[in-house]
Image: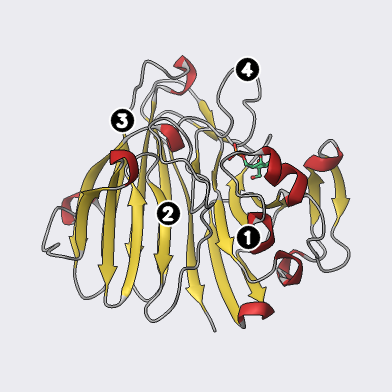
Amino acid sequence: MTEENLSHQRVGDHIQLKPGLNGLLEIHLKYGQASLTLSQQGAQITSYKPDGHSELLWLSRTADFLPGKAIRGGIPLCWPWFGQHLDDSDQPQHGYARTSDFDLFASQADDQSTRVVLRLNCPNPKWQESVNGLRMEFEVRLSKHLWMEVRTINLSDKDIKVGAALHTYFQVANASGVQIPEIKGLDYKDKTRGFATFNQSEHLTVESETDRVYLNPPKVVSLVDPGQQQTLEIQTWGNTDLVVWNPWKDNACKMADFDDEGYTSMICIEPANALDNQVRLAPGEQHCLGKIIRLCS
Ligand code: TA6
């Protein structure tokens, strides 16, 4: 979709802006009976209900909705790095995007979908000089499924390395009962064991803290949740990795914005350019990281 053909057109009640908790501006999209909510802060999707279905995303009951504080749940955008900054530990985990304000750059609603493009105000004096030459925008298209894409373009005259993730929190009946069949056989770096590399020789069962960066994942993975009799198909592009995370009980209790029992009903599945798999963008080059979430049953 190019900029010129996506403007603020025919949005009617398909796209509405209104203040949410603590006055954080929210963007509400509708397509038929499907609905989605984004926070202007971080361009973070906080709710997604497909047509005729309940909420697919997990949101902590103790999530903060405060300016400059990451919202615990939904789909935080980790950008322009994933995890700890590789060179400067004083920099915020998962980068600046999720605690920064985005502008609603374009919006359109028609028979195909209801879509918005949000653009991150760059440069930002708060940010590291090294990333101020980037422009980032996030496009969301709501239709019978959910399409999203983070686009990063290097507007500077030097190479810039970028990491990112669509840090998606999925609502599940019971974290210990879900399967992600397509990760079986993949190598992964295990954060709980010093990012050492292991192989997922058997199907993953989440029964303790799980924090893994799966390498070179297939472009389509599924989240099978027998407890809800639900399967989601997640089609991805632009990612080198797939992160799977559940903090489990002790870590959940240590995070004030993570409700203590919330770990039992969530799993994060995150297409990413993580750790040292950052993308090097030459001047003028663009990188797209995206995915489609389809409810299969
Ligand atoms: O995506 C997994 C992870 O990197 C975990 O290590 C954990 O730190 C999680 O992200 C949440 O990070 P946050 O900064 O949102 O608390």
| Mark-to-mark CA distance, 4 and 3 | 22 Å
Which residue shows up at 52% across the image and 31% down it?
95
Pointer 3 residue = 121
Give whichever of discs 4 and 1 has the lower sequence position.
4
Q: Quadrant of the C terminus?
A: bottom right
Mark 4 lies on residue: 88
Report whether the residue tagged 2 is closer than 8 Å to ligand 1.
Answer: no
Which numbered disc flags the more N-terminal residue, 3 or 2?
A: 2
Instruction: Label 1, secondary structure: give it.
Output: strand
Residue annotated with mark 2: 46
Is residue 172 visible in the rendered structure shown here?
Answer: yes
Looking at the image, residue 207 lies above or below residue 224: above
Say above or below: 153 vs 87. below
Does any atom of ligand 1 lie closer than 8 Å to the CB of label 1? Answer: no
> Which numbered dot is residue 266?
1
Could you tell me if the residues under marks 2 and 4 are in contact, i.e. CB atoms within 8 Å? no
Q: Amino acid at mark 3?
A: Asn
Along the line of sight, the residue nearer the viewer: 23 or 139: 23
Give the mark nearer the N terminus: 3 vs 1: 3
- Secondary structure of the residue carrying numbered label 3: loop
